[in-house]
Amino acid sequence: MAAQPARPDIRRPSAFPGFASLAWIVAAAGLGLVSIALVLNIQDHGGTVPPTSTFAAAGIAISVVAVVTVALAAHAAGTTWRAAIALGGGFAAIAVAKFGMGPTALYQANRAHPIEDVGGLTSGGMVVLIAIIVGVLYLAAIWLLAVVFRPAQPPDGPSGKFVVGLIALAVAATIATSIFVSTAASQYVTFAMTGLEASGIALALFVAAGLVGVAFRATAVRAKALGQASMYITVLWVAIAFLLVFQVLWIVFLLAIVAIWPFKSVTPK
């Protein structure tokens, strides 16, 4: 049976997240800021490097915020509780890697390997540079999972070409900034992949990818059953919004850390 043509008199459902989902996204930002402030206030500010407990506490706190707010926002977007909880769990795993293990690996490696600062960036500038490039890689990974499990082809589903563009952009930016600005981003990725915490980070990100994949698959099944491909896109936008929120929270957290314990860096001659 041939597919029915789209009727111009029927408005397609909006894929933009509704008020309830947006409210939980805003709540995540607020709760995340409060959690970071509490962690920084109760931790010891002495020593030449930040204590590992600071990063562990931040990872745990943000992961709790993530699993609750992401799950509630995703469910408000129309997906099942199973998918919503899986998505929340995925972001909790990301938070553990992002706020706990990643910065620990960076500071431990930075003791022996100063960052090459070609452009004379401050430690705060390096944090922002790392966040932008790593954030693009996270976005590419989430979009790729969304493409794998999409319930419909573009334009009703996410396009795979976007993933290729994001990865190319991240690689080009990493190479260009390493040559002309700072090796902060490339060294951060290298330290995370080869340092003492590498296996823990890999496991956390593997769990995160698995849970996010489960969430997208379950959402795709529900979207097909209801005949609402737009719901799948809505959940994808919710995931991307939370990724942006946690990237900003990471920048705030690391800016506060480097204000007390700046990175060791050298300027090549």
Image: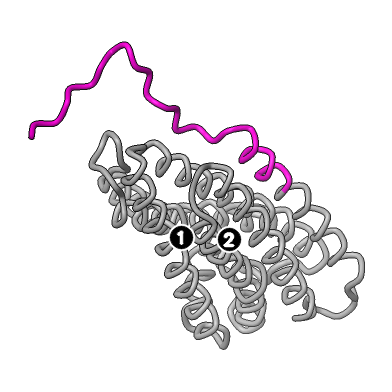
Check disc 2 and report the residue beneath it.
Answer: 88
Considering depth in this image, is 151 or 148 the residue closer to the camera? 151
**Residue contact at pointers 1 and 2, CB within 8 angstroms:** no
> Does 96 appear in magenta?
no
Label 2 neighbour load within 10 Å: few <14, some 14-19, many 20+: many
Q: Position of residue 136 (x, y in %)?
A: 46, 52
Kind of residue at disc 1? Ser
Q: Which mark is residue 178?
A: 1
Residue visible at 65% across and 71% down in the picture: 103
> Where 197 falls versus 41 (above or below)?
below
Label 1 secondary element:
helix
The segment highlighted magenta reads 1-27
Q: Quadrant of the N terminus?
A: top left
At x 42%, y 27%, the residue is 13
First in sequence: mark 1 vs mark 2: 2
Q: Quadrant of residue 223?
A: top left
- Disc number at residue 6? none
> Which residue type does callout 2 highlight?
Gly
